[in-house]
Image: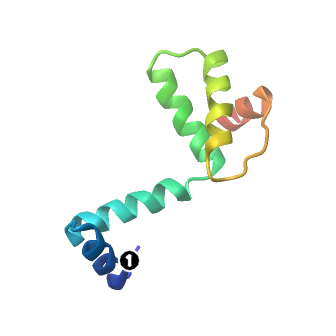
Amino acid sequence: MELPEELLEHLSRVSGVDPGRLRQVVRETLAYFGETAPEFVARRHRELQADGLRNAAIFERLQQELDARRFAAGKLTERQLRRLIYG
């Protein structure tokens, strides 16, 4: 994705951060906020499993995190969460 140089120059001016570093930060930010609810659920499930959590705790945590995210996922039941993960 090509980022507007004007944006990078502006952010560099107001933050004092190198434009190259800002390019990376802006791309990461856009990717983070571009994640869909199913992508988020699958990623976080893998991460939380790797941390040793069991599914009951993972599903509760996922619902809390979905509530705090920018996309409106609505309330998902445990069954809906399972279907996002396992199909």
Residue lying at 66% horizontally and 25% vertically, measured from the top left? 59
- Where is residue 21? Give x, y as percent: 23, 63
Q: Residue at x 23, y 72 (%)?
A: 19
Q: Nearer the viewer, residue 53 or 18?
A: 18
Q: Residue at x 67, y 16 (%)?
A: 56
Nearest the viewer among 76 and 42 is: 76
Q: From the viewer's perspective, tell me whether residue 2 is left or right of residue 30.
A: left
Q: Is residue 76 above or below residue 21?
A: above
Give coordinates of residue 6: x percent, y percent: 34, 85
- Quadrant where the N terminus sits is bottom left
Give coordinates of residue 2: x percent, y percent.
38, 78
Q: Quadrant of residue 74?
A: top right
Q: Which residue is mark 1?
A: 3
Is residue 61 placed above or below 15 in the rendered structure?
above
Give the side of residue 52 with respect to residue 22, left or right.
right
**Where does the C terminus fall, quadrant-wise?**
top right
Q: Is residue 3 above or below residue 51?
A: below
Q: Residues within 10 Å of mark 1 (few under 14, many from 20)?
A: few
* Three-letter amino acid code at the position of disc 1: Leu
